[in-house]
Amino acid sequence: MLSMVRSLLYRIVKLRIFAAFIVVILLCALFTPFMMWLNDVWPAFAATGIVELPDGPVPALQLYGFSLVGGSFLSSVICLMMGCLVAYDFNFGFVKNLIQAEGGRLSYVCAAMISAVVLTTIVVAAGTAVVALALFLQDIPLTPPEVGEAIQWFIQVVLCISAYASIAVFLGIATGSETVACIGGVIFGGGVIEAVLQMILANVPGLPVFIRDCLDGYLAADLDVLTQGIVCDPMTYVQAVVTLLVVGTLTALVMRRRSLG
């Protein structure tokens, strides 16, 4: 299992568009620090009021949230990476070799889901470090969070994005199409599907309240809260973990009947 996870993560680095992924991740991480720097050195830009800073220190988690979680760009990129990887494995026959050499179909599904969590953890941790370094170099006064608060925020971000990435894995395995997996991953990772479903449910007459409002506090809403640097309630852990387990189970069922070519 671990060797299969290592193999999947290694092939992510070997993807032809991996360099583009790194550039996008860096742009996401540096956008907010860059805007703050621009606000500081360009009076005409500061006069527009695009960047509004408090008089005192800025909460660190809020800046990390705006930089990494805001706009769902990072979530979409990670989903894109996982969708590309799995579809690539099917298109070029790597999945068949992995299953024969390292374990069964279930092992591949588990390894892919674990890889999604590991990749998300690495990207969020690296992105946070880049933002922190950029803010430090600009000598921007920050209000550091409590250690427990920072850990909870980090874990919730990782779990919510990993849940979306698991859907990209499912699409890649179910279709074997890089196009479907990539586009689907971006759409799910960006919260578009949730927004559309919320709108549909809100406009269907006669629906019970618990069905109509079932997506109001789901992953996209949690990520919106985390963007503000605010730790969500414990239900976030439940929703993200249950999503990972349900999607993982569905993926395993699809994988059992999937032709490996």
Image (cartoon, rainbow, N blue to C red):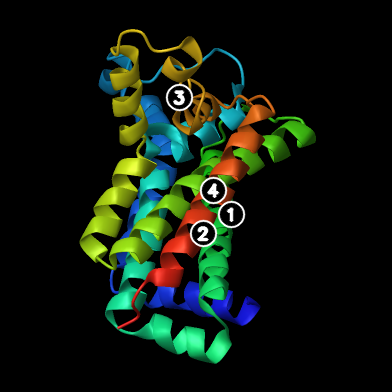
The residue indicated by pointer 4 is: 246
Identified at 50% across, 63% down, the residue is: 252
Give the Cα separation between the discs numbered 2 and 1.
9 Å
Circle 4 Cα neighbour tier, 10 Å, few/some/many (<14 / 14–19 / ≥20): some
Q: Nearer the viewer, mark 4 or mark 2?
A: 4
Q: 10 Å neighbourhood of mark 3: few (<14), some, or many (≥20)? A: some
Residue at x-position 45% and y-position 70%:
256
Q: Name the mark on residue 215.
A: 3
The residue pinned by badge 1 equals: 121
Residue nearest the observer in this picture, 49 or 123: 123
* Kind of residue sitting beneath label 1: Thr
How far is disc 4 from disc 3 in space, using C-alphas?
16 Å
Q: Please identify the quadrant where the C terminus is shown.
A: bottom left
Q: Earlier in the sequence, mark 2 or mark 1?
A: 2
Task: Tell me which label, 4 or 2, sits earlier in the chain.
Answer: 2
Asked if the residue under mark 1 is in contact with the one under mark 3, i.e. CB atoms within 8 Å, the reply is no
N-term-proximal mark, 4 vs 3: 3
Name the mark nearer the viewer: 3 or 1: 3
Is residue 114 positioned above or below 78 on the image?
below
Q: Secondary structure at mark 4?
A: helix
> Could you tell me which residue is drawn at 48 percent across and 22 percent down?
214
Q: Quote the CA–CA distance across marks 3 and 1.
A: 25 Å
Q: Disc 2 designates what residue?
A: 116
Residue 251 percent location from the top left of the image = 46, 59
